[in-house]
Structures are given as C-alpha cells and as structure tokens.
Image (spheres, rainbow, N blue to C red):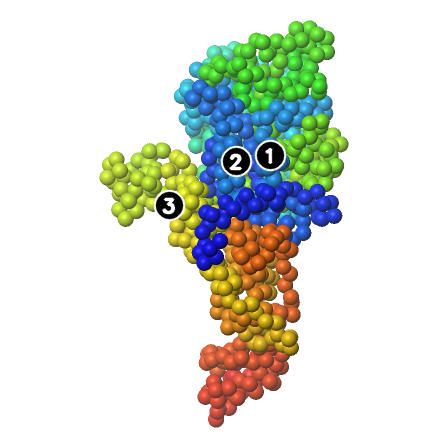
Amino acid sequence: MDSSRYNPASIEEKWQRTWIELGLDKTSTDNHKPKYYALSMFPYPSGSLHMGHVRNYTITDVIARLKRMQGYRVLHPMGWDAFGLPAENAAIDRGVPPSKWTYQNIDLMRQQLIRLGLSIDWDCELATCSPDYYKWTQWIFLQFYQAGLAYQKEAAVNWDPVDQTVLANEQVDSEGRSWRSGAKVERKLLRQWFLKITDYAEELLNDLDKLPGWPERVKLMQANWIGKSTGAYLEFPVVGMDEKIGVYTTRPDTVYGVSYVVLAPEHPLTKQVTAPEQQAVVEAFVQEVTNQSELERTAEDKPKRGIPTGGKAINPFTGEEIPIWIADYVLYEYGTGAVMGVPAHDARDFKFAKEQNLPIKVVIVPPDNVETLHATSLQEAYTEPGILVNSSQFDRMNSTDAKKAIVEYAEKQGFGKERVQYRLRDWLISRQRYWGAPIPIIHCPNCGAVPVPDQDLPVLLPENVEFTGRGGSPLAKLESWVNVPCPTCGTPAKRETDTMDTFIDSSWYFLRYPDAKNEQQVFDPTKVNDWMPVDQYVGGIEHAILHLLYSRFFTKVLRDRGLLNFDEPFQRLLSQGMVQALTYFNPNKSGKDKWVPTHLVDPADPRDPQTGEPLQRIYATMSKSKGNGIAPEDVTSKYGIDTARMFILFKAPPEKDMEWDEADVEGQFRFLNRVWRLVADFINQPRPVDNQENQLSKPEKDLRRAIHTAIKEVSEDVEGEYQFNTAISELMKLSNALTDATCKDSPVYAEGIQTLVVLLAPFAPHIADELWHLLGNTNSVHTETWPKYDSAALVADEINLVIQIMGKTRGAIQVPAQADKAELERYACESEVGKRYLEGKEIKKVIVVPGKLINFVLG
C-alpha cells in the first residue's frame, strides 16, 4: 500500500474485514481476566442512524476498545428496541406488516453500525420483537404475576372516540385532541394491567445512594419522580352519613384553616354526598370533566373549575361544618382522590377560594410578624413555615413542631395517623395495540385469570391481522386467536388482548445479552451474575427517569425471585449531550412551519425560500422536523469514520451538548493526516541505532518526558470522567513534540511514534491499525497492552525558572531541577537578566516559588 497518502475509505473497509476475520470483537470467555460490560442504550429501528446515535455508540466503543487493551474481557453488545407504535403506524400508512417494516429497518441500521467500525459483538444481537426474545418477556411477566406484582384494575385512560382506541398521554396534544384523528379525547374507565412498582418505592429511593457513578441530576430526577413525602392521613366525617372523606396532607399544621374539602369528580363518594338540588349540575360537570385528558385537568396555566355538591363534612379538629366541592384539578388516581382546602396557606387553594368566594382562615403567621397577618390583608397564600394561630391548643407553636403534635393528637382522637406516601404510582402496562408482547393470560369464566403455562410460551402475535388504526386493538377482533380453551379446566375462554408497554422490553434486555442465544431459560444466572452489573451505561438524558427506574425495578424483582445476586443494573451512567447543528427559522411563522431546512438556505443571505423574509439562525438539536440533520454517511464518505469519531470526541466533553461545525471536522482530518505523515516519514528513514552507553541526550530526555506525560495524561483523561476531548489534546501535544524533535534517529523517537499510534487506537481505530502495520507489526494494535508511564521519565533534569524583579517578569533561565533556594538565587544573579537588573542594587528580599520562579524585592 502507498504509505505516503492517507486514504480513509480503503483502509477502513480493509480493517473492518480483518477485525471480523480475527474475531477481535467477540466476547472473551477467559475468566482469568476481569470483566467489563460496556453498553449503549439500544436504538429503536427507525430506519436510519443520526449523529446522536453515532455519538452515543462512539463513546461506548472507545471505552470498550480501551478496556480490552487494559486487559479486561469485554462485553459490548447491540440490539433493537423493536416493538412500538411507529411500526403499527407504518402498517396503517404503508400497508406493510409491522414485522416487515421493523426488520427492514433493523437490516439497514445494522449495516450502518457495521460501517462505523464499532467493536460490537454481533453474536449477542437481539430484537425485542423476535419471538425468541418476547417469549422470555412473557415469562418474566408471569414471574411478576406469581409474586403478586401484576394485577388488573379499572383505570381511567385517554379514549379517542373517533378511532375507538386508547391513547398514551404523549398522543394527546396540548388542546386535549388525538394526534391522529383530531378528536377531543375522552377519559374512560377500562380494565388495565399494572405492575406494583410502588412495593419497591422505598428501596428504589434508598438504593440511589449505591450509585456514586451516576450523575447527581439523574439521581435527583429519580428521587423526585418517586416523590417520598411524610405527612398525615386525616378523615373528615360526612354530615348525615357514616362515610368519611380521607385526605393526605404534608401540612397537618394547617388543619385548623381547612374551610372546604374537594373530591375528584369521579370519586365514589361524589354521588353520595351530592344534595338533590345540586344533582343535575354535578352530573353535568362530572360528565364534562370525565371527557378531559389528565393533561388538560392538571395544566398549571388552566383555570381551576369546581362546583359545590351541597354536601357538608366536619373538620374533626374544629367541629365546624365545611362544604364539599368537586373540582377538575383533583384526580381520583392521585393520593386519596380528595384534598382539604387551606386557602390561606396553599397557592392553588387560595386562587380557588378567591374565585369561588370561599372562606380564608389564617392559621400560620411569619415568626417575625405574629400579630399583623389577617385573611383580609392576604394578597397571596402564606406557604412558609411560621407560628400557629387560631389553632386551639397548638397556638404559638412553630409549624415544624406542630406537624408532629397535631398528628399525634389525631391518632389519639382516632381521626388521623402519620403516613409516608409516594408520588410514584403503579405502572400501567396495558396497551390496546398489536405490535407489542402479548400479555400471557387467559380469562376463563370459571377459573378467572389463568397464566399461560410455560411450555405454551411464547404467545405468538398472529400475522393475519388487519390494520386500520380504528376500533381498538387489532388482536381483539381476531376471533380465531382470542378464543382458546382454559389451560386449567378446558372451558372455552378468551386470551388477554392487551399487549405490554414497550418499556417492559427495555427493562431487562441488558440481562439477556450475556446469554443471548439461550433457548432453555431466560438466561443462565451464572453468566449474568458474572457479567452484571453493567460497568458503563451510555445513553440520552431523556431516559433518565422511566427507563432507568423500570430497569432498576425489574432487577430487584428478579433478584427477589432468586435469579440474580445484585441490587442495581448499572454501576456507572453517562448521559451524553445532544448533537446540535446550525438551524434556520422564520420568526414570523409558528409551529413546524417556521423551520427552514438547511439545504434550502444560502448561508451568505439566509432567507425564507417561500416568502423571501430574512431568517434567524440558532444551534438546535438535530431533527427531521427542523431540517438541520446531517447524515453520518455525508461525513464519513468525505472525511472517513475515524475523523468523524475524532470530531465527536474532541468537540465537547461527552456529557455536554456539542455543536456541529464542518471546520472542526476538517481540523481533525488534518490532525490524522499529520499523524500519518509522521509515521510515513519515520518508516522511510534509516532505523535508529541503540545508544550503547545508555546515556540519553537532553533532546532525548525531553522527548521521552513528552511521551510518558502523554501516556499519563491520556490514561487519566479516559478513566473517571471520560474527558476524551482533553485526551485528544494530549495526543496532539505528543504529535507536536515528535514533529519538533531533533533526535529522529534515536530509539526514543521510535518509542514516541509507536506510543502515539497505540494511544490513538481507541479513538481512531482504523488508521491506528494501518499505521501499526506500516511500522512492521503483524498483530492488530487493538491486541496491544495499553502503555504504562514511567514516573522517572516525567522528572525533568532542568526546569524553566522565571526571574521577576519587583513582581515583574524580566526573563527566564534553565536551571537544574534539584537546585535548592540558595543555588537558584546564585543562578539568577549570575544570569544575563540578573546582571542587567540587579548590579549595583540593594536586594531587600528574595522570594522563591520552587520549580517556578524567583522574585527579587529591591531597596
């Protein structure tokens, strides 16, 4: 091969073939080596990779390659999060089966990933839509069922009355309309399957402390989602009835200020407490609110609407009768489905009470303003801690102490108790759709819900299904599939027609990779316990809550079922930043119409091609809707894969957003060309001769120090926080040191060239292997041991001593590194700089900063 010119296309293709032939990316089974599990979040097979994918997988690939060179056996797998609504929509829009559309996309994206030269072990590949995977998803569901962690109950769902189907919250727009039909979405009660994640709420919260390798912001997001609070459960008796309205509050210190209670319109007590004269208006309101989505009802910017039921409850603390209202902002699924109204001390209650002319009673005042706060003077709710007033025997207590005292009093009186509550709700996993794992339950009129026996798994998705997008689940319409005999008693029964939320599939896939081809069991616990937990997980911040929380939940349940011996699935988490590109928009337009695709814009005079109006530009995350995406192929075909990798790694630390800039891409291409020329020039010059006396010259010592400084700095940068950008800067410094070296015929120079290539290998794997072979090596550079630095080489014989006179720098001299203070003073005084500025002057004081500078203070 012509070593004089860097040709990325030819060498990248060549080395990818060679790596496959050598089996370099296969997972080692040498148990004498320590294990390292490097994992990227697997993609949805949408049909094409974008630069966000490339960044994610490049980061993980560098880690995997580095760890192999450091002596680890590495598991670096890839798969496909392949179930979900987009495939079903494709079936509706394109008239192709979801499986065909999905597998076509998988084939396309797999080829793109292979083309990127990622060191993935493709023998571990899995697709969640494959029966040999979802068989075990169904088996895991039955483990939850047997443990009492899977159950059915009536739950409110978003219902599209036109398409006759259930919608996820994200399929309902901000106006409460269906994303597909445009119909006003209704709320409807359906029997749905749930997983009892709330049983693990406390452990999921506490075990965040076991994750020092996670970003603090992600742990905080999870903690907030779980939402633990300690408060009080209080009961308000209904006047004229034996019923009581239960509420949960974190502010029991405000109970003497309760002036009304509010029920969710769908609360079972609503009908019972409604007075006859209010019945018609209450029923109309309930019907109206029921048809609103949860999003609409709880939106902060929407006015809170409610009406009185005519019923009354008793505040057990005061004995006063207070009105019972219903309001749209109270949801039956949250807490107890009822709240107590304390308008003086809750912002939402204050606003509601003002609008509805309800009483406002102050019971807490600021500590420094005890006498002056009155309901009439309140401009807004006072929500801070303070001193209790108008609160019977608790007057003058501070609110923190009062919380405890009031709960104890309520417990003694029998109308309340302390309660720990979580914001987290049980996980609704039912989906009335086709393209998901069928829930393996059969409903028998005699036996009830019967699990499908293990030997009958998987419950296969039928293929003879019609897709219209209307009328609920396509599975429910397929009589031949729905009607089956009960596995227990043989009576004619019906299959469960709901499929599982696709988050189920991604909540355990990392457990399948270590034993991906096992047909006999979900996985061999010995293999999984060996490889798990994942040592480094890399993925987008958008998965910081649900995916990671559900994965942690699954791990803990399977541990409790005796299948795993660890508590947490992911030891370290890296949430990589977004890839942003120059984006054009018309400020006079709104919505999707305002974005103008980059290829339609003249950068010198950016104007809307339709209206001619001037465009504004920003850096925004690459997306199809903004027309600012850059296909990986556009970059790799022009500059090569290694350049694309180097740019992605150099432009920003992995956790930060990065701006795409062609000039910076070219900069990395130029750097790789410089490295290529360094090696090409080296192999064309005579071989260096060993110095028999083993005494290094000063240029050799300086170069060796630069080499081992690079080894030290790059090694430190790629550990810990993965500062790949500064690691590449160190490679550039070493490259410059080699370029400037005056000892190119020395073995030290040869050591430097070899070291540069080895250090470059995880970052730019193709060019590194080509250069390694041009240097005369027969093995792959990726089988080399990662170099260790020689600490003795880092010690300088001489240092640069800055000379200051009265604090001003006047020059610098080379001095022996080991010189003491007296010697440094002598060297400085005898130097040209010293003679020029010090002769004939009185030196009052000498300040020495060892290894850096000397400062003379003159009289």
Q: Position of residue 837 (x, y in %)?
A: 46, 87
Q: Quadrant of residue 749?
A: bottom right
Q: Quadrant of residue 693?
A: bottom right
Residue 139, numbered label: none
Which numbered disc, 2 or 3, marks the residue closer to the eye?
2
Label 3 vs 1, first from the N-terminus: 1
Question: At 58% from the left edge and 14% from the top edge, which residue is drawn?
Answer: 272
From this viewpoint, is residue 148 visible?
no
Label 1's element?
loop
Up-down: is 293 above or below 402? above
Distance from the alpha carbon under mark 2 to that under mark 1? 10 Å
Q: Position of residue 850 (x, y in %)?
A: 59, 76
Badge 2 crowding class, 10 Å Cα cut-off, few under 14, some 14 to 19, many 20 or more, is: many
Up-down: is 559 above or below 1? above
From this viewpoint, is residue 301 visible?
yes
Which numbered disc, 3 or 1, marks the residue closer to the eye?
1
Q: Which residue is mark 1?
A: 125
Q: Which residue is mark 3?
A: 582
Q: Which residue is mark 2?
A: 110
Question: At 59% from the left edge and 29% from the top edge, which residue is drawn?
Answer: 128
Q: Position of residue 769 (x, y in %)?
A: 55, 52
Question: At 61% from the left edge and 45% from the top edge, which residue is drawn?
Answer: 22
Distance from the alpha carbon under mark 2 to that under mark 3? 28 Å
Q: Amino acid at mark 1?
A: Glu
Q: In the rendered structure, are the residues bearing label 2 and label 1 in contact, judged by CB atoms less than 8 Å apart?
A: yes
Q: Amino acid at mark 2?
A: Arg
Distance from the alpha carbon under mark 3 to that under mark 1? 35 Å
Q: Quadrant of residue 302?
A: top left
Label 2 vs 3, first from the N-terminus: 2
Label 2's element?
helix
Q: Amino acid at mark 3?
A: Leu
Residue furthest out toward the bottom: 840
